[in-house]
Amino acid sequence: VVASDLEIVIRCSQALDVVEPGSVALPARKLFDIAKVLPKGPVTVVAREGNYVEISAGRGHFRLAGLGSEEFPEMPEKPKGKPVALDSETFRRLVDSVSAFATGDETRYNLSGILLERQEEEGKTLLRMVATDGHRLAIADGEVPSLGGLLGERRVLAPRKGLIEIRKLSDGGPGSLELSATDKFLFAGKGDTEVWVRLLDAEFPDYQQVVPKENRIIANVPRGAFHDVLKRVSVMAPDKVNSVRLSFSGKQLEVSTNSPDLGEARDMLPIEFEGAPVTVGFNGRYLQDALGGISEDTVRMELKDEVSQVIIRPASERNYLAIIMPMRIL
């Protein structure tokens, strides 16, 4: 079975008892709707004249109109050369850590995808994924045995939707994804499923320029407690901007918000803090997304002053970093 929207192509294979080979193009949504309601047991699929297909299971019978297989978009070729084997869990973590940070605004084409690039650090080979919407940025690294010829010196920009489809392959349990790339497509395979994702022809911004180099204010914050406080306070935050105020002082962090139409909320949590007291406003949902990319119990927050962006990263690991621009809160 092959499905395509011209940007993503998915091919799945299943062993069947085939009486007579053939092919036909069918409307994907209606075929999926039929498959969902079929009773358990054997399914019979028969192609008829005029590109009709009869689907039967139990007492249920459907006759679905289709098109000739020649009307279906041409399949892309499989990349030549040996694919790179990448641990499924590593790929899943990278995509989950950065995908929320890509913009949903299709007019900002170069920010609608996720950058994949190769990094070498302390003798280790890393696959790096980067995403930004112009207001926030996330960088996630995963150690891999080798990237072979997958990236080399290249950086590839893949649409977020396509990487999420490849990520679904990793949900099938442990094992490796097979990854390879051409100038136009990123290819992934696992088991009986193969995915082609058309790469974006756009220039991703130089993200290294926005990573702050000097931060005088450092806070170590319990991740779980911080996430819970943000969820509670955000209930009263203005819907469109979801603004919250973070006040660092002494050994505590106060999270608050107020809205003329709704009211206000505040909560506190203990932290380890270095630097002068400071109050900064941020989008609460952006902060929660950043915490979602961290599995450690403690996160490290770094700021320069009350008008600078915040860096959020694991307290001990160096495999993830999020940057969020501040908001002006009256």
Image (cartoon, grey):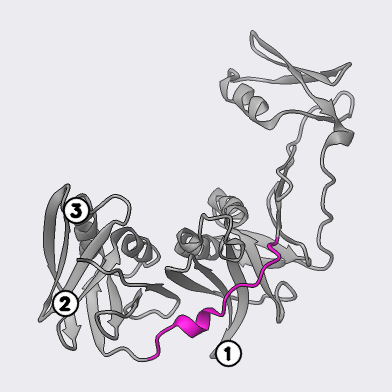
Element type where label 3 sits in the image:
helix
Q: In this figure, which residue is indicated by the disc labeled 3?
A: 232
Amino acid on which disc 1 is placed: Gly
Which one is earlier in the sequence, the residue at label 2 or at label 3?
Answer: 3
Q: In this figure, which residue is indicated by the disc labeled 2?
A: 248
Local packing at callout 1 (Cα closer than 10 Å; few below 14, some 14-19, many 20+) is: few
Distance between the alpha carbons at the discs numbered 1 and 2: 38 Å
Q: Residue at x 13, y 56 (%)?
A: 265
Amino acid on which disc 3 is placed: Arg
Question: 115 or 209: which is nearer to us?
Answer: 209
Residue 95, above or below 75: below
Element type where label 1 sits in the image:
loop
Residue 308, above or below 66: below
Which one is earlier in the sequence, the residue at label 3 or at label 1?
Answer: 1
Closer to viewer: mark 1 or mark 2: 2
Local packing at callout 2 (Cα closer than 10 Å; few below 14, some 14-19, many 20+) is: many
Element type where label 2 sits in the image:
strand
Q: Residue at x 29, y 78 (%)?
A: 300
Q: Position of residue 9 (x, y in %)?
A: 72, 47
- Residue lying farthest to the top in this orientation: 59
Question: Residue 240 vs residue 134: left or right?
Answer: left
Distance between the alpha carbons at the discs numbered 2 and 3: 18 Å
Tell whether label 3 touches label 2 (CB within 8 Å): no
Question: 85 or 48: which is nearer to us?
Answer: 48
Q: Position of residue 151 (x, y in %)?
A: 70, 75
Amino acid on which disc 2 is placed: Phe
Q: Is residue 64 magenta?
A: no
Q: Position of residue 254 (x, y in %)?
A: 14, 68
Q: Position of residue 142 (x, y in %)?
A: 53, 73
Local packing at callout 3 (Cα closer than 10 Å; few below 14, some 14-19, many 20+) is: some
Q: In this figure, which residue is indicated by the disc labeled 1?
A: 123
